[in-house]
Every structure is written in C-alpha cells, then in structure tokens.
Amino acid sequence: MSRRRTFADKRSVLAVSVLVVFAAIPLLSSLISYVTARSAQPFLEMPDPKYENCVRETEYMRYHHWELLAEVREDFVRHGKRGDITLSGCKECHPNRERFCNQCHNAVNLTPDCFGCHYYPETPEAELMETYLNGKTTAPAAIAAAERNR
Amino acid sequence: MDVKFKPIDGNTPRYWTLVGILAVLALAGAWSTWLMFKQGIYLSGMTNRVPWGLQIVMAIYYIGLSAGSLVVSGLYGIFGKAEYKPFARMAAYLAMLFLIAGLLSIITDQGRTDRVFIEPFSHANPWSMFSINPSLYIGHITICIIYLWALFNEKYRLTKVASVTVVAWAIAVHSGTGAIFAFTPRELYTSPLLPVAFVAAALSSGAALMILVITALFKITKRHLDLGLIVWLGRLLAVFIVVALYVIMIENLHRFYLIESRHAAMYYLFGGWHAFLFWGGLILVGSIVPALILFKTKTGTSLRWILFASVLVVVGVWCERYMIVIPGQTFPPELFPGMEIVRSPLNEGIAVYNISFLEVLQALGVLGVIGCMFVLGLKYLPLAPAEARTVGESQMLKHMMPDAEVTEAAVSAEN
Amino acid sequence: MDRRDFLKRSGVFLVGAPCAYVLHVLPVSGARASSGHATATRRWGMVIDLHKCLEDCTACVESCRHENNVALHGDERWDVYWIRKVDIESKEPAVGTEESVPLLCNHCDDPPCALVCPVQATYRRDDGIVIVDHHRCIGCRYCMIACPYNARFFNYKENHDWHNKNYPKRSHGVAEACNFCAHRLDDGRLPACVETCQGIAGALTIGDLNDPHSEVSRLIADNPVKRLREDFGTEPKVYYIGLPGR
Ligand code: SF4
Ligand code: SF4
C-alpha cells in the first residue's frame, strides 16, 4: 500500500510541475516584454512640444494607449459614440508608423493587429536611411533602422 | 461485485509504435491548422457557399461517439447491470476524450483561432446554439471527470448520482448538437426531428464503438471476456439502429410529402453522389445490414459478426453526419420563388464541396491527439478491467444462445 | 449568521447570480443591439426600383468594392460581394419574364445571423443596420449558415486590394456582409452604391422607414413593393419594386 502511495504521489508531483511550467510560459514571456519595454530606448519622432498631453499625459500614453484605443473602439463600433480620439487623429501628429509606433512595438517584439486592416502610413527602413542621407530625418532613427537591418 | 482493474503493461515495441504513429498524426494536424491560421482557411475545401466542411462533420461525429459512456453507464448505473461495471471507467474516459475531440475540431475550424479563448467568454450570446453547446460539452467533460473519479475511488453513491447525471446531460448534449443545424432557417436543416435523430444515431454509434474498443482491448491484452456481455450490447445496438432508422425515415418522408420541400427532399435523396452515402452508406451498410446481423440469432451471437456489424454502424453513422452537414449547404435557398437565376457572378445553383488534403490532416490530427490520450491512459490509469464476466444471467443466455461455445462461457461464469 | 440563514443566503446567491447574468445579457444579446446610438428613432431601409435598374450595369457593385475594400480574388469560391447583380428568368418559358436584380444583405429586422452569432459580433444597431464587429468575430461561419439569403461572405484569403485607405479592410478569417455603408450614413452621406446609382439610373434609394415623409416611405406607399422571401419571417428592409415571380 505504502509503495503505491509514494508512486501516486510522485506522479501527481510530476503532473503539477508540468502544469506549472506550462502556465509559467505565457506569464514569463509577458514579464520579459514588460521589462524590455521599461528599459528600451527607442527613438520616437515627437511632434511639437506644445502637443504634449494632447490626449493623455505621455507617461499614461506610453504604457496604456492600447487600453484607451480598445475603449474608444468599443464605444464607436458597438455603441455609435464617436469621441475626439480617433486613429486618424493620431496620424496628424505621428504621420509615420515606422518612426513612432513600430519603434516600441519592435523593441518589445510585438505585432499589433490594427495595421492589417487600418491604414497607417509606414516608411520602409531602407527608405528611412535614404531620407537621413538627404538630411530629412534624425540620426537615431536611421541608425536604429540600419542596425535592425544588419 | 468486486472488479479488479489492471493497467496494460505497454512495454512492447508494438505499443510504442502505436503511440508514435498517433503522435505524428497529431503533429501533422497541428501543422495544417497552423498553416490555415496563417494563410486563411481557403486551404480547406470550404467556400462561401459551403462554409462548414469536414471539421464540422467530424466534430458532430465525435460528439455522437461519446454516447458510448451513456450506454454503459446507463446499463450499470440506472438498470443496475453490475456486470457492465468493468467497462464503466473506460466508457467514461472515452466519452471525455471524444468530447475533447469534438471541441478541438470546432476550435481548429475557426477563422480566428486566436480569439476563440477570449471572445466567447467575454461576450457570449446566450441565444446562440454555438455558445450553448460548448457550455454543454464542457459540462459533460466535467461530469465525466467526476464520474471517473467516483469510479476510481469506488464511491458508490456518487457513482450512482454521476451516472444518472451523465445520461441526462448527454441527452442534452446530443440534442443540442442536432439543434445547431435544426434551428437554422435552411431548407434541409430546419426540422424538429433532427435532434432526435442525432441522439438515436449517437447512441448506436457510441454502442458500436464501445463494442469495438472493448473487444480489441481484451483480445490484444489476452484477457477474459464473456461473450454474453458483448451479445447483450449487440442487442442494444440493434434497437438503437432501428430507432435511428425510424426517425430518419419519418423526417425524410415528411420532407418529401410536403410540396414546398419536395424539391429539396428530391435533392437530398437522389440528387448527386451524396445520395450514395445516404442509400448505400447510411441506410444499407449503416442500418439494414447490421440490424439484420444483430437480430438473427445465429450471427447475433457470434463475436465475429457482431464486430463486423459494429464496424458497419460506425461507418454508417459517419455517412449520417455527412448527410446532416453538407447537402443542406450545397442545396441553394430559393430566393425568387417561381424564378430561376440564370446569370450571377457567383455560383447560385447547387454547390460542390471537395474535401482538401489539409482538412483531412486536421481531422486525423484530432484523432491522433485523443488516440494518444487513450492509449497512454490505458497504461497509466487503472481503466482496463482484469476480466469481465457475466453473473446470474446464464439462464437467459442459455435460452438466447443455444451454441455450445456460448453456453460454456456462460456456465463458467456461474462458478 | 446561523446555519439556516447561511443556507438561505447561499441559495439566493446560487439562484440569483445566474438570473442576474442572464437578465443582464438578454437585452443586448442576439437580435437586439446595445443602446447608445444617437439614431435610435431612425430605421434605415432601401428601395430598389427594378424598372429603372439597367440590365448590364454593375456600377453599384464596383463602387461598393472600391468604397469598402471588398475582396475580389478572381475565384468564385472566395470572391466577396456585398452587393451583386443576378439575372433571373421565369421557370415557365411561356411567361418569359426576365429581370436583373441587385442582391445585398437585407438588414433583416429579426436577423437570424445576429441570433446565432456566438460572440455577438454580428448585431443589429438601433437604427436597424445589421453590422459585423470585425474586432470580435471568431470566424465560426454560423451566420453564413443562418442567413437564408446567401448574403454573407467569409474572408477565406487575405485581401491585398486596398482601394480606399480611409476605410479599413478585413483580415482573413472573419465574416462580412453589406452594412449600408454605416460610416457614410453616420456622416450624413449616401452609401456608395446609392450615390453611384443616382447619377446613372436612380434605381436605388435609401432612407428612414420610420419617417412617413421620407422618400423610401413614399415609394413604398405609392408602388407595389415586395421583399425577398417574406415567408421566412425575417422582416427584410430592402424593398423591390417590380420583382417578378410569386
Ligand atoms: S440578409 Fe442575411 S446577413 Fe443580412 S440581416 Fe438578413 S440574415 Fe443577416
Ligand atoms: S463568423 Fe463571426 S460574425 Fe459570423 S457568427 Fe461567427 S463570430 Fe459571428
């Protein structure tokens, strides 16, 4: 009897540890991207400082813009309430996805679903380098792009 | 009655080859599902006219097969046939697996598999058969697990309660699955009898599969199995077949008799190669032949014939599931009564559905997953009974089966 | 709290919680949409005058395709048509009626597609438009099974034509159907097909069915109108003038 018990115990310990490991994988991966997001130094092409805090404070926007967007989307698509926050509004100050959205998304290795269906202009990275050589963009963005290309 | 359970040894190369093959199938299914998730499900044979294909056929087929537990637990838990207790664990385990297979088929069939685990929980529509049914399936899986636990730990009262619940819940599950189709406004789907036919066919396919699995397991592991038990299950199977056949007959007669649906009924019964599946697969191979085999005393008491009939039923019920899902979609709705669509950028007539290779891989993959779980379960869980004998039935069996071989088996059980 | 009290309370909770859940979801579920639309008093409907509709004209189909980025893969199995033109002919050759009919989602008042959608992705707005929330659709295709008019389509393949960059396209794996150009109606513009047709034949009219003075109400009152398969009981809101057949 006692032998069988230990056997069963060993098995359940094994099963539980397998479960824990599997549950930990998604948690770990989101933890890692959270840490990288906090420590990343992406180049963001910023608009005129007077637009600072245009929608919400910068700090809030940096980490929670997607929650805000989801909320706005729900209000508009499901309830027909159109507020002042729209994706085309974002485009006014951040006209280029490559120099704004993609910088952080790439740093944390994340591909949001939005741009598959909603148009947001994007300059390919090679082109960005070229505009830099013509003196039309800043160095950090071009360097970041070149590094990623390497 | 004290029943001993003994897991199979599972050390032979044959065993591990089987596990390997099933695992490879599962991987192939996962690969094809990944491909469809990345590129779009045009890779399956589905089209805008036939939006439900093989995966839905397989899903309702698997869910029907899970009725095997219902049959056995009903025999043991409700009618108190203690000699079927040895199979109760296996039946409950198989039922759980087949429900998992059904859910897996449905999940892998979605266009946006990534949302399947989010949206149905956060925004469920309580009116939709597609959100009622998964709750029923998950409930059934849970009840099966409780039932299994009760059986493993020999909790008699809980077993009794759980087996009755399993039966009631399973009826709801199978009717609900039929209702997915029966409650939609399509000419060949709408029918109050479809859920009933679904339950009947589920019972017959479940019983047939139980016969096959039990016999195969006992033969391969060389354990003792009294023929009487299988013969009894065979009798039951025959009754289920007849009931299913009857309901399907009424359904089609009704459709054929009414003028407004006669055209659709003609298409269903005679219009195309699916008619072969209906007449040849469902009616002849799936119902009439096995019913005759099982009702005839000579063949109905011989193991070989019973197994043959069970295989026929398992095949026949697959044809029935195909006939539920596909012809109802390929038959076009009549948008303009009295008129005919002569020109359209799309196919407005009878549509075709060609099963694609990747779809077959997906279906096999699901089979591989649950096959693996079953074979490994036999090794690691106390599912398989050491032996199965009849008790106190020898008089009836003698009466039923005058064969020398059978009488001997029955008598040996008395001792 | 004594034992009796506890049992009573837990009983109330056990019964009450599911009831509260069901009551909470019922009004917004299935066929009925969530509240909040500013347009709750309006009910959009369309009238199609088949006498005016030109036989070989597909301008509405093309303008819809360009406005809404509707996918055309060049394979009739997967092509998407929010609106399509079909030619119908009487089954008895002696009668010999022929007509060219635009077919689109009928925006049923009791839409079976919204009833069966498991995640409420398809829903009926308060102004009567049946619309798909593509952010939520899981791609089960149950709505296509339930629609008795074959008006729903599925994105089997990724769509690479992006004609109108101001309007989103759809990823592969979601269902879609005509939405009366809800984005344009909300802005006070006419749907693309109606706008195009009014410059050519004037066969399509859209308007408020609740307003007895709107043009659609007038057309419905002045002409014998028919809807597709009224016997289904889905209460379509697309009316045809001059539709032949029974
Ligand atoms: S026509 Fe079809 S898609 Fe449109 S509302 Fe009616 S059922 Fe839904
Ligand atoms: S395909 Fe999408 S819109 Fe249609 S029923 Fe399924 S989830 Fe709803």
Image: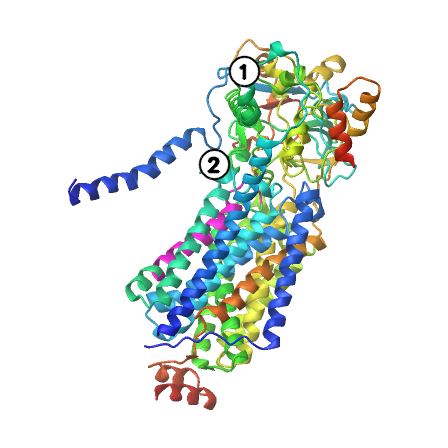
Residue B290 percent coordinates (x, y): 55, 71
Instruction: Evaluate whether label 1 is on the same chain as label 2.
Output: no
Asked if the magenta segment contains residue C110, the reply would be: no
Which residue is at a point 68% across and 46% down the rendered structure image?
B36
**How many other residues sit within 10 Å of disc 2, few (<14), some (14-19) or many (≥20)?**
few
B162 relative to B408 in the view: left or right? left
Q: Which amino acid does label 1 sit on?
A: Gly
Who is closer to the viewer here, C180 or B187?
Answer: C180
Label 2: element kind = helix
Residue C235 in sight in this render: no
Name which residue type carries label 2: Ser
Q: Which residue is drawn at 81% across and 29% down?
A: A126
Foreground of the two, B27 or A104: A104
Residue A70 lies in quadrant: top right
Residue C149 spot, x, y in % from top left: 62, 34
Quadrant into which the N terminus of chain B falls: bottom left
Tag 1's secondary structure? loop
Q: In which quarter of the image is ligand 1?
A: top right
Q: In this view, does B180 lie above or below A9?
A: above
Q: In the rendered view, would you say C212 is above or below B269?
A: above
State yes or no: residue B167 in magenta.
yes
Residue A83 numbered tag: 1
The residue carrying mark 2 is: B122
Placement of C179 over or under B411, stated as above or below: above
Q: Quadrant of residue A53?
A: top right
Q: What stretch is highlighted in magenta?
A: B163-187
State yes or no: Cβ of the residue under disc 1 lies below 8 Å from any atom of ligand 2. Answer: no
**For disc 2, does the CB lie below 8 Å from ligand 2?**
no
